[in-house]
Image (spheres, rainbow, N blue to C red):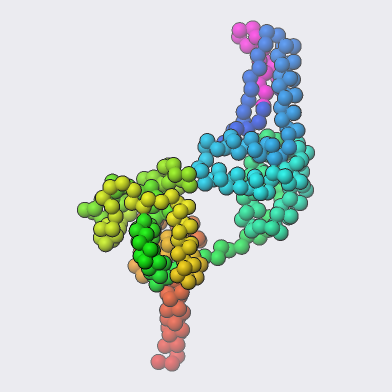
Amino acid sequence: MKAKKLPSGNWRVQVFIGKDGSGKNVMRSVTAPSKRQVELAAAELLKLKAAEVNMKLEECASRYLELKKPVVSYGTYRGYKTIYERYIKGSKLGSKSVSRIKSSDAQKWVSDLTMQVSPKTVRNAFSMVSSTMTMFCPDTTLHVKFPQAADPELHTPSSDEIKQVLRVFEEEGDFDMIRAIYLSSCCSLRRGEVAALLGSDVDRDRRMIRITKSMSGDGSIKPPKTRKSIRIVPAPAQLIELLPPSGRLVDLKPEQISNRFLRATKKAGCTHFRYHDLRHYWATIMTYEQKMPVKIIQEIGGWSSDQMMRRVYVGVIEEEKKRQLEAVSDTAAKHFFD
């Protein structure tokens, strides 16, 4: 903190007061007619800053939430809010002032949390703590060791399993869910993209659907998940015929789609799989049956990278896996026994 004389004759001091919601340094400029006055004013500002640093972590995390709310999606904010309510507010770590939190305190909190929730949740919770500390106490860096992440247990449904779920909705006359299932199974759309679709997004002559928006959990419309999610996808002629010519194609919010789908899978007696797993199904059949190049699958599905698509989304349908294993045995055997 060094006073600098300005051309006007006044003196100025730049005081660092923290970081904003995007992590950028926030400086406060203090000016006064004399060097002594500006130094006193800067000192007062630093006292206020010191008082802020003595705030409890849970208080800072609450302010961090409010700062982030306008710049993140509804789903992301809801995730932050859940973490705050369940794991920070009222916790031993949350009751400590941010200026007194050490790596050992954070490690104890992470280790205790590991006994209660998944490794992914532990990392997400610590990420919020770390971001809060960066904003309100930027000179403190916390070093912790996380539990080993478990591979996600994903079940890629077969065509028969999807048909079982479709039959449930056909019996109930739920045409919104029938259209939603076809849009994800045949076009690899996310639930938010499905919920935001309008009749004007469908090019019926070319049998194409334009994806330019997505619906958040609160019903608001926003751009899709990533820049590459803005795309045009092909659709079967039979699906195009099922889509309304105007208005919303599926009159449901994203969470309603997921909840109805979960209920139907239970009613159908299927192995548990999520609505989102219909994207896995689409990527899998395009990979193993259509032999479609990975780059094309990535572009149609709107994945940000082929590594992400390969690592998370392309599963192996059990029937295809069995066929492939039999082919391996037959290929090896023919070299010796034919």
Q: What residue lies at 44% left-to-right and 42% top-to-bottom? A: 220
Estimate the x, y position of residue 267 in percent, counting from the top left: 47, 68
Residue 59 horizontal side relative to residue 319, left or right = right
Residue 48 horizontal side relative to residue 217, left or right = right
Estimate the x, y position of residue 237 in percent, counting from the top left: 25, 60
Q: What residue lies at 28% left-to-right and 47% top-to-bottom? A: 246
Estimate the x, y position of residue 51 in percent, counting from the top left: 74, 28
In magenta segment, residue 300:
no
Residue 236 visible within the image = yes
Q: Nearer the viewer, residue 184 or 82?
A: 82
Q: Nearer the viewer, residue 127 or 192?
A: 192
| Picture layout, residue 221 above or below residue 164 | above
Residue 308 horizontal side relative to residue 229, left or right = right
Q: What residue lies at 46% left-to-right and 45% top-to-bottom? A: 216
Give the magenta-colored segment's residue range.
2-16
In magenta segment, residue 9:
yes
Q: Quadrant of the C terminus?
A: bottom left
Q: Quadrant of the N terminus?
A: top right
Estimate the x, y position of residue 173 in percent, counting from the top left: 35, 61
| Picture layout, residue 110 above or below residue 317 | above
